Image (cartoon, rainbow, N blue to C red):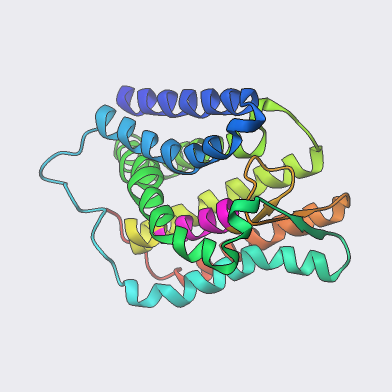
Amino acid sequence: MNRVRGLTVALAALALAATALAGWVAPAARWPARLGLLFLLPMAAGAIASILLPRSAKRLGSSARVLGTSRYPGLLAIAIAFDLGAIGAGYALGWTTFTYGEQTLEAWKLFAVPLALPFTIAVATLGAEWALHARLWEVAKRASSTEAASLVAVGTGALLALPAIAPGFAIVDRHYVASALAIAILREVTALRLFRTGGLFVAGAYRGVLIAFEGFGIADWYSFYFPMANYVSSAPAFYALRALGPAAALALVLVATRARTVEA
């Protein structure tokens, strides 16, 4: 249990340090800083997890096996559509509008997200998923209980989302921050469920696609990310609606995988 505690503290410290540093970044350095947050932060988490909780030779690869992945592409596509569809619903209701984004990415138009996908899925799988679930959750589950391990993994994963939500710990809009934290928690629960039922690569694909969309496609104006386009809203109702998207995605995944729990 001490090793689990050590990794939890190390990942929390990494998240808090990244959050603080994101608030100090000069405007001219924000684009490379955003790339660092997208790619280096999850890979640093994965490296720390491998150092503090190295996998034994006997269990090597059990989490990485592909478990019925032919059933998952459709499920992942619908779940991600539910998650991001709340943005379109908010626009249709007149609660949010779209605005400009990073000009470098805007020049790539619709190619930005597809080109980023292989890289974001790789770092999500080998970085975040490996750290949070293949190492932290698995070892914590064996040391205590599934429930306790899940709370630790979900909480730590949500904390790793904090640098993009509140760089420098700044609360620029309380409705946005509350919604973004709720989204982070809901996505972590969904990713854990996908890991438990589909394995490392399924959960990594889910996480990686969302990272690509928010890092390179579209994100909230208040987010540290500044992708191809942004959406902006002053309506508290929109932020409540925005959190309902990941909630619907989680409900879908729970129902679709209710008969499948494969422990690594």
Q: Is residue 205 left or right of residue 173?
A: left
The magenta stretch is 205-216
Q: What is the quadrant of the N terminus in the image?
A: top left
* Residue at 31% over, 61% down: 262
Front position in the image: 6 or 208: 208
Q: From this viewpoint, which residue is outermost toward the left?
A: 57
Could you say where residue 89 lies in the image, as x and y percent from the top left? 77, 69
Q: Is residue 182 above or below residue 136?
A: below
Q: How many marks?
A: 0
Front position in the image: 100 or 177: 100
Could you say where residue 257 lies in the image, as x and y percent from the top left? 44, 69
Front position in the image: 98 or 167: 98
* Residue at 32% over, 43% down: 138
Write down the quadrant of residue 201 in the picture: bottom left
Could you say where residue 178 lies in the image, as x and y percent from the top left? 74, 41
* Residue at 59% over, 46% down: 185
Front position in the image: 131 or 143: 131
Write down the quadrant of residue 71 in the picture: bottom left
Residue 20 belongs to magenta span: no
Q: Is residue 81 above or below residue 63?
A: below
Residue 212 belongs to magenta span: yes
Q: Main secondary structure of the magenta part?
A: helix
Could you say where residue 196 lies in the image, as x and y percent from the top left? 37, 57
* Residue at 21% over, 34% down: 54
